[in-house]
Image: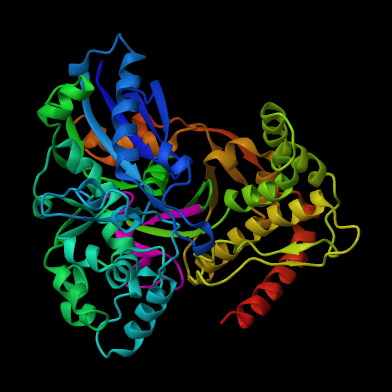
């Protein structure tokens, strides 16, 4: 194992990060981050319409820049000793492509068309299409293809997004030979593929978002897809039948990218996966452990032996897929559409007058950098009480349990004494209550949860949020040591694909970084939060009843 390295590439919402990892011990040799310039400028996005698109050039520039930077920071590493690269991305983040697998936004005439770009995971422009998919799935008389995705299809997912753009934009409907997930496209670029039909597609992406399942022969039938649009039915034959787990090799790094990156064509490129699933691997997920990937949103991951779940369908989650996290085990996914996003929204709300004031930019930045810290400190000092402000965390809709992206956030119990820290505290409690709803659903469906593991930016940075979470869940919350868990998990997949380890469990055992902190529930807080949670549930029921 000595002097063998792999690279994990983690595409997030705002940036891409690459890490160079020593396969013998999981030590990070170097890392590099690239913030998407077009995304940062707000291009191609209309937040008021929940339209969020990303240009493929942001991804390509970040891929090249971060990998080259990682290698430049580690001159002692021989490029020939970099044995594998694995990529994880957000999802579902699909894009329309031509026959060669090139996104339409990189072809003539589509350069500035948002519909020709990647439809980011949090794009909710297809709410109506998702509702239609759910209605037809239950009534068309054939297989309910949503059954392994919690029984409710989301506007955040593959088919709803494709259906929406196909109907909205005739040029895309006519120009698209096929569609690819972000996590499938980047590996295909690295191996130099020029035929989308030969690309190995991610089991994780297909199973959790595209209604792929072995029991019905892969993707939903043409007959079913034709209930929505004949063009959707025709597309099926131009997509894929087989899927692959992330520990499988997609191919070797092509000559062009080897020269571009300063690596060799012996480097193995593994099949892609989603960021949260790679993150779960990076923090050493095991049976009966719920891993909460806490960033702008959350993805909540579990794995279970097949004999524990059997044919049982877990209602209202995002999916249950063979091998989506650990090959040979069932992967279960849930999550919240807003976690850090809710706190960021409130920060931006509080910053409005500052941003629009005639103040020096550096002063504005100092205030913005300190506001969450100041609010957290003041909010933590407020006693927990049934009389506190209560909020809902549904500003991006609700992912699970029971997806409904039409839902909105709400605040209850405001008075003249409700200051910014009081409302901020309610926001923190809301995201923790949303987490409890997910934990309760798993438990009520018979899925055992013995421990909680937290990872991601919020988990590492906020003692206030993590202690509140432990109190609300009435369970200890362990915090993973690695600050780049998805990239580390991707690196573990790469080590298996490259033949360095025989399976993912062996890679995890050798390359895991462990845990550095545990938050334990405070008994008196647990009892108080149980009462506040009842108010959260009641507020949620009222808001949902009023949502058309």
420 with respect to 139 (left or right): right
Residue 531: x, y in percent?
A: 77, 67
In this picture, residue 145 sits left or right of residue 257: right
In which quadrant will I find the C terminus? bottom right
Residue 345: where, in percent of width, then height? 63, 51
> In which quadrant of the rendered view does residue 353 lie?
top right
Q: How is the image coloured?
A: rainbow
Is residue 263 found inside the magenta-colored segment of the image? no
- Residue 447 can be seen in this image: yes
Return the residue nearer the eye: 2 or 270: 270
Vertically, is 73 above or below 170? above
Q: What segment is highlighted magenta in the picture?
A: 298-327
Residue 262, quarter of picture: top left
Residue in the picture at 65% in, 61% down: 433
Residue at screen point 27% across, 69% down: 166
Work out whether residue 36 can be spotted. Answer: no
List x then y, in percent, for residue 503.
24, 40
Farthest top residue?
A: 76
Magenta stretch holds residue 302: yes
């Amino acid at each position: 194992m000595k002097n063998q390295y792999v690279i994990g590439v983690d595409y997030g919402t705002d940036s891409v990060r690459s890490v160079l990892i020593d396969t013998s011990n999981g030590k990070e040799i170097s890392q590099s981050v690239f913030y998407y310039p077009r995304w940062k400028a707000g291009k191609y996005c209309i937040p008021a319409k929940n339209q969020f698109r990303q240009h493929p050039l942001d991804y390509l520039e970040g891929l090249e820049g971060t990998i080259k930077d990682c290698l430049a920071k580690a001159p002692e590493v021989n490029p020939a000793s970099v044995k594998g690269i694995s990529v994880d991305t957000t999802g579902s983040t699909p894009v329309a492509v031509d026959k060669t697998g090139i996104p339409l936004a990189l072809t003539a005439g589509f350069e500035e068309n948002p519909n020709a770009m990647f439809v980011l995971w949090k794009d909710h422009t297809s709410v109506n299409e998702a509702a239609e998919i759910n209605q037809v799935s239950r009534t068309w008389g054939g297989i309910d293809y949503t059954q392994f995705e919690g029984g409710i299809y989301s506007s955040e997912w593959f088919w709803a997004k494709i259906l929406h753009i196909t109907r909205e934009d005739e040029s895309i409907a006519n120009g698209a030979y096929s569609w690819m997930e972000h996590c499938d496209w980047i590996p295909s670029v690295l191996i130099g593929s020029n035929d989308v039909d030969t690309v190995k597609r991610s089991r994780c992406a297909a199973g959790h978002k595209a209604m792929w399942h072995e029991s019905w022969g892969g993707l939903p039938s043409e007959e079913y897809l034709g209930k929505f649009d004949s063009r959707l039915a025709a597309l099926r034959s131009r997509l894929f039948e087989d899927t692959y787990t992330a520990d499988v090799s997609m191919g070797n790094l092509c000559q062009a990218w080897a020269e571009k990156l300063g690596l060799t064509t012996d480097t193995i490129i593994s099949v892609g996966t989603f960021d949260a699933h790679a993150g779960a691997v990076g923090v050493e997920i095991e049976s009966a452990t719920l891993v909460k990937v806490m960033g702008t949103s959350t993805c909540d991951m579990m794995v279970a032996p097949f004999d524990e779940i059997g044919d049982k369908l877990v209602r209202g989650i995002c999916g249950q897929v063979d091998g989506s996290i650990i090959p040979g085990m069932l992967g279960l996914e849930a999550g919240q559409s807003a976690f850090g996003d809710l706190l960021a929204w409130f920060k931006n709300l509080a910053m409005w007058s500052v941003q629009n004031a005639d103040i020096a930019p550096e002063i504005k930045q100092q205030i913005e950098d300190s506001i969450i810290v100041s609010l957290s400190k003041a909010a933590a000092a407020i006693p927990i009480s049934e009389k506190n402000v209560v909020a809902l965390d549904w500003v991006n809709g609700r992912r699970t349990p029971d997806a409904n992206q039409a839902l909105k956030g709400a605040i209850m119990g405001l008075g003249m004494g409700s200051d910014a820290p009081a409302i901020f505290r309610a926001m923190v409690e809301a995201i923790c209550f949303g987490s409890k709803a997910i934990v309760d659903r798993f438990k009520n469906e018979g899925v055992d949860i013995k421990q909680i593991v937290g990872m991601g930016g919020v988990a590492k940075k906020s003692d206030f949020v993590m202690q509140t979470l432990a109190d609300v869940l009435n369970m200890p919350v362990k915090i993973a040591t690695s600050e780049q868990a998805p990239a580390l998990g991707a690196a573990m997949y790469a080590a298996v694909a490259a033949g360095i380890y025989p399976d993912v469990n062996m890679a995890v055992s050798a390359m895991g970084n462990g845990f550095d902190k545990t938050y334990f529930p405070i008994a008196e807080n647990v009892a108080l939060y149980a009462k506040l949670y009842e108010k959260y549930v009641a507020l949620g029921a009222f808001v949902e009843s009023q949502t058309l």
